[in-house]
Amino acid sequence: MTKVLVIGANGSVGRHVVASLVEGGHGVRALVRNRAGSALPAGVEVVEGDLTAPESLTAALDGGVDGGVDGVYLMWPGIPVQPRVVELIAEHAERVVYLSTDVPDLADDEPAVIFHQEIERLIRHSGPAWTFVRAIDFAGNALGWADQVRTGVVRWPYGRARRSLVHERDIADVAVRALTEDGHDGRKYLVTGPESLAHAELVRIIGEELGTEVRWEELAPEAAREQLTAAWGNAAFVESRLRAWESFTREPERVTDTVEQVLGRPARSFRSWVREHADDFR
């Protein structure tokens, strides 16, 4: 049995990591900012801590009810990088699995473009065995269309952009396998859905699973830029998303067989994700 500290236990992937570890009979310690606001399975040891205050992790890594932990699942929530967090993990754990994204490797002297690259580099040089689970955009991002789905029309740019959205449970299952089995050290797993589907096709599938017609209406990039900047508050991020979606109209987002290679079964489909979350769209 492995004892794992799950950092990001309430997240869309982390909660599945917790559930899968519990089902496998492994010990789970969950790091949360607020114990009162957490709803975790019975048997999970909950410890308060905050990545912005690295020393608050010491008790979670080395204390708790049953002493230290063997491995750490790390999700970084987009706050400024804290190298001390990685140092503490290295001091107390033998293995770390980091939830990253589809980023290129960097040499030690190259500047990081996004925080995932910087954290990956810190982990690579920290000492413990490591695995990076580089996930394509989550299927759960489709919930951003929920309000429009309820009206019967989704207005969004680049309806022909082909995406390989991945089910969050598949990401979690790959992470858990890397945390609890040998043979995954130093691996960089790009995890995707099983196929690339156009934005408009994703919307059609949502409608089919809800038993109602949901139409796609193309939104001009200029209008999308204005609306999304107002909604998300980050013009640079909006611009990067628009560029990516436009590129997927010419070259579909990558599809890998990582889930099947690691887990021995096919990746879950977007349609299966919609079935599980149908009530969230109603």
Image (cartoon, rainbow, N blue to C red):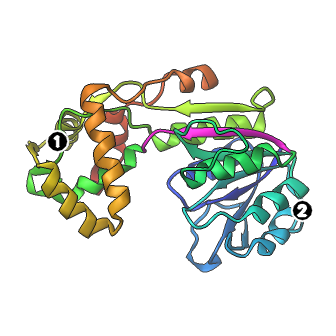
Relative to 2, does residue 84 appear above or below in the rendering?
below
Coordinates of residue 222 in the picture (x, y in percent): 15, 54
For the residues labelled 2 and 1, the Cα–Cα distance comes to: 48 Å
Report crowding for label 1: few under 14, some 14 to 19, many 20 or more residues within 10 A (C-alpha).
many
- The quarter of the picture where the N terminus appears is top right
Q: Earlier along the polypeptide chain: callout 2 or callout 1?
A: 2
Q: Nearer the viewer, residue 135 or 106?
A: 106
Coordinates of residue 199 in the picture (x, y in percent): 23, 38
Q: Nearer the viewer, residue 22 or 100?
A: 100
Relative to 191, does residue 261 appear above or below in the rendering?
above
Task: Assign a secondary structure to mark 2.
Answer: loop
Asked which quadrant contains residue 273, the reply is top left
Q: Residue furthest front?
A: 109
Residue name at image x 84 percent, y 71 percent? 59
- Mark 2 residue type: Asp
Name the residue carrying label 1.
207
Decide whether residue 99 is among the magenta residues: no
Residue name at image x 85 percent, y 44 percent? 128
Coordinates of residue 45 in the picture (x, y in percent): 75, 65
Residue name at image x 27 percent, y 65 percent? 229
Q: Specify the segment rendered in magenta.
A: 128-137
Decide whether residue 129 is among the magenta residues: yes
Name the residue carrying label 2.
66
User: In the image, is 69 to the left or to the right of 118?
Assistant: right
Coordinates of residue 126 in the picture (x, y in percent): 83, 49
- The quarter of the picture where the C terminus appears is bottom left
Residue name at image x 19 percent, y 44 percent? 210
Relative to 248, does residue 236 appear above or below in the rendering?
below
- Mark 1 residue type: Gly
Report crowding for label 2: few under 14, some 14 to 19, many 20 or more residues within 10 A (C-alpha).
few
